[in-house]
Amino acid sequence: MLIAEYYESVRLVWDQCSKIAGSCQESGSCFYMHKFEHDIYYRTLMNQLDTKGGSTSIALPVVDNCAIQFEFRVQDLRKCLPEIQGDFDAVFHDPFSPQKMPELWTVDLFRHYQTLLRHRQGLVLTYSTAAAVQGGLQEAGFQVLKTRGLGQKAGATLALCANLDAQPFLVHAISPEPWEQLYLQSRAGIPYRDKGLSHSRDQILATRLQEQQQSSRPSGASALKLKPGYGHSDR
């Protein structure tokens, strides 16, 4: 699994935050990680990682003499991603929000994920359900599903490689509704672009805005009008 996170100042975050790498348990051939939240769980890792850069590997014990081997790279994802080799089953994509950091939510970055996942027919999981993100995943060749909400938490995005059978995932995820599909085909679904994986935040935002202004796609508002309950409020 490739876990893609970004910290504006890694050293500062590691000094000021505490993190406990989530306890894990083995279930069949899969490992499930609990409480791998990015705001509170760094205590177990902070003394073992070199936050000055480069990469390091650590093994975290799980159960019955089993351990998960983690390789950490403390660097710009856009710089190291093209260098990563191998076949992956899953990518957990968890940077800051698309509006704050569009450079880590581009269709060009998602295409690299597609390359890493294609052989093993893998998937991408991310908390963001933004139209630009889902539209970018679709353009990169993924099937887009939504995970079901849990408690007060809204659902997330599950993106599957194109030829992967979605049926087994529909226990925990749902296909976008017709109005949501139309929304992704509207100007709202135009993705962020960064062909060389080197443009600044302002350049990426400006490029998307220009593409939206010049696009012949319908507006997002036209799709939203088809959303059940649109325009109705409780009285």
Image (cartoon, rainbow, N blue to C red):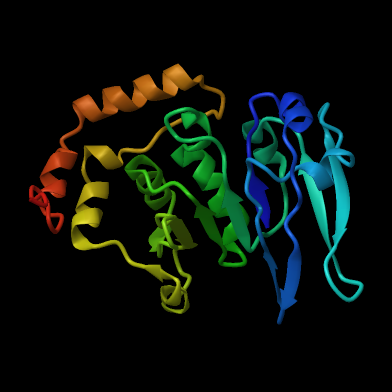
Q: Position of residue 230 (x, y in %)?
A: 11, 51
In this view of the protein, which residue sits in the foreground, 92 or 112? 92
Q: x, y percentage for residue 42?
A: 75, 42
Residue furthest out toward the bottom? 28
- Name the residue: 40% across, 55% down: 154
Q: Position of residue 46 (x, y in %)?
A: 83, 39
Q: How many marks?
A: 0
The quadrant in which the N terminus is found is bottom right
- Residue 47 is drawn in which quadrant? top right
Q: Quadrant of residue 7?
A: top right
Can you see residue 218?
no
Horizontal side, residue 17 vs residue 119: left or right? right
Residue depicted at 20% across the width and 32% down the height: 215
Q: Measuring 20% from the left and 26% from the top, which residue is drawn there?
A: 214
Quick check: 78 above or below 176? above
In the image, residue 112 sits, relative to residue 173, either above or below, namely: above
Residue 116, position as x, y percentages in the image: 62, 54
Asked whether residue 87 appears in the rendered view, the answer is yes
Residue placed furthest toward the right: 65
Check the image and report above or below for 110 versus 158: above
* Residue furthest out toward the front: 235
Task: Indicate left or right for 170 with 65 as reference.
Answer: left
- Pick whichever, 78 or 1, lies toward us: 1
User: In the shown orientation, is residue 232 left or right of residue 52?
Assistant: left
Q: Is residue 144 left or right of residue 113?
A: left
